[in-house]
Structures are given as C-alpha cells and as structure tokens.
Image (tube, rainbow, N blue to C red):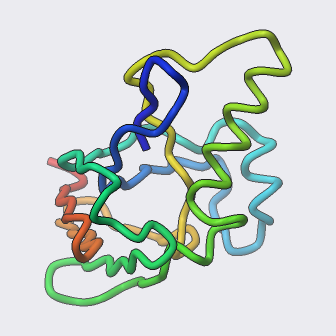
C-alpha cells in the first residue's frame, strides 16, 4: 500500500517480495525468526497501482504460478489483522520513534501464502484477481 503526505493509504498494488534468507530450509525456521534475522528481504516487485475504492482488501486472493503450474495460493485475510493491520503497525512503530512515513512510501503488507521456494531460471506469475498480476523471472 502506498502512503500519501497525510499518512493515509492512497493506492494499493499487487506486489511480490523476493526473499533471500540465509537459512537453507525456511520451513524449519519460524516467521518471527526470519523477521528478527533482518536479512531475508532482497527486493520487491510492485504492479500497477489502483485506488482503494474498488478493492476489498480483506478478500484479495492470490495464485502464484511457476510457468503454468500453481505452486501457492492464499487470501489476504490470512494476514495478521488483515492488510490494514500491517500498515497501522508500521505507522505506529515509526511514530513511537518520532518519525513519519514519507509521501509515496510503499508498505508491503505481508504474505498470504507463506514463503514459497522458487527456482533459478524460472518464470513466475502472481495473480491477485481484480487487484492485478505481477510477472517476474529469476535468473538469466
């Protein structure tokens, strides 16, 4: 979600966070441990922004495909406190430190599928239904 100058969400977009955790098997490590490690995120792919008016953020479904094969799926309601909960937490966290979140800042709200292993030299598509699709390739 994108934050405006007043600290409010002014747009949403489909997004995929690329993870490069130092753990070789993330299925054996808890989510909080990966977050506390503070080294897992290595990039984000953000799709076309949309206004909030026509999107029910608590009901966004996502299907991740490698080529034509579905490898993960989920719904945004699986996020702790929903998508807005992540934004509210981030804004409150920064406020307790005397900082604001700048106009145009994107906040990634979390995963509705969990960490999904991917392969080098493969193409992926993350379909977020009415929100849009993000396509990406890993490797050369």
User: In the picture provided, is 91 more to the left or to the right than 51?
Assistant: right
In x, y percent, where is residue 28?
76, 72
In x, y percent, where is residue 81?
71, 64
In x, y percent, where is residue 84?
59, 54
Residue lying at the far top of the rendered structure:
98
Question: Which residue is at the front of the view, 22 or 69?
Answer: 69
In x, y percent, where is residue 55?
33, 66
Quadrant of residue 38 in the image? Answer: top right
Quadrant of residue 71 in the image? Answer: bottom left
Tell me the residue at 62%/65% (across/down): 82
Tell me the residue at 85%/21% (across/down): 96
User: In the picture provided, is 135 more to the left or to the right than 38?
Assistant: left
- From what the image shows, is residue 44 above or below residue 136? above
Residue lying at the far front of the rendered structure:
53
Q: Quadrant of the N terminus?
A: top left
- From what the image shows, is residue 66 above or below residue 97? below
Question: Which residue is at the front of the view, 124 or 55?
Answer: 55
Question: Which residue is at the front of the view, 124 or 113?
Answer: 113
Tell me the residue at 68%/31% (across/down): 91
Quadrant of residue 3 in the image? Answer: top left
Total numbered badges shown on the rendered structure: 0
Residue lying at the far bottom of the rendered structure:
69
- From what the image shows, is residue 105 above or below residue 53? above
Tell me the residue at 31%/57% (across/down): 53
- From what the image shows, is residue 42 above or below residue 78? above
């Amino acid at each position: 979600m994108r934050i405006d100058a007043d600290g409010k969400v002014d747009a949403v977009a489909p997004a995929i966070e690329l993870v490069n955790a130092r753990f070789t098997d993330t299925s054996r490590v808890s989510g909080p441990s990966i977050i506390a490690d503070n080294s897992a995120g290595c990039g984000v792919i953000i799709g076309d922004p949309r206004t909030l008016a026509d999107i029910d953020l608590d009901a966004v479904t996502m299907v991740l495909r490698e080529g034509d094969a579905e490898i993960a799926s989920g719904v945004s309601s699986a996020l702790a406190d929903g998508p807005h909960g992540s934004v509210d937490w981030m804004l409150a966290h920064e406020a307790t430190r005397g900082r604001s979140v700048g106009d145009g800042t994107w906040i990634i709200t979390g995963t509705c599928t969990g960490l999904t292993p991917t392969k080098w030299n493969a193409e992926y598509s993350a379909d977020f239904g009415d929100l849009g699709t993000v396509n990406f390739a890993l490797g050369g």
